[in-house]
């Protein structure tokens, strides 16, 4: 969402095709970076989930 909001703010109401192309590329780079950062969190999340599930203590 953050990437989308940032690009919408930059683009304005009537962007030219050149601006659309430029901002599309910028959006893709931002989205890729965002996905990569969340993917880095997955191993830690998996470890925590396994630890909690192995205790069999659910509320």
Image (cartoon, helix red, strand yellow):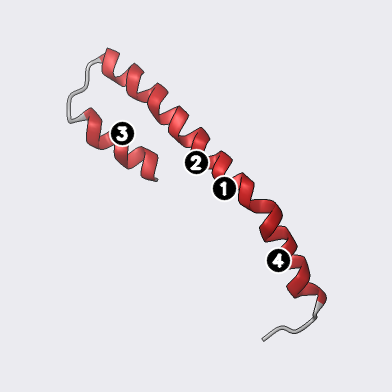
Q: Which residue is mark 3?
A: 7
Disc number for residue 38? 1
> What residue is shown at x 28% (from left), y 13% (from top)?
18
Q: Residues within 10 Å of mark 2 (few under 14, many from 20)?
A: some
In 3D space, how far apart are the residues under numbered discs 3 and 2 (Cα atoms)? Answer: 14 Å
Q: Quadrant of the N terminus?
A: top left
Q: Residues within 10 Å of mark 1 (few under 14, many from 20)?
A: few
Q: Between residues 22 and 37, which one lies in front from this camera angle?
A: 37
Side of 54 where 39 appears, left or right? left
Question: Secondary structure beneath disc 3?
Answer: helix
Picture mark count: 4
Side of 3 where 37 appears, left or right? right
Question: Secondary structure beneath disc 4?
Answer: helix
Q: Which residue is mark 2?
A: 34
Mark 3 or 2, nearer chain start: 3
> What residue is shown at x 30% (from left), y 38% (from top)?
6
Q: Which residue is mark 4?
A: 48
In 3D space, how far apart are the residues under numbered discs 3 and 4 (Cα atoms)? Answer: 35 Å
Q: Quadrant of the C terminus?
A: bottom right
Q: Between residues 24 and 30, which one lies in front from this camera angle?
A: 30
> What residue is shown at x 57% (from left), y 47% (from top)?
38
């Amino acid at each position: 969402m953050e990437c989308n909001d940032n690009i919408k703010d930059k683009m304005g109401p009537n962007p030219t095709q050149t601006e659309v192309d430029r901002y599309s590329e910028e959006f893709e780079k931002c989205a890729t970076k965002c996905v990569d950062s969340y993917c880095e969190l997955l191993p830690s999340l998996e470890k925590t989930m396994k630890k909690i599930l192995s205790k069999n203590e659910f509320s």
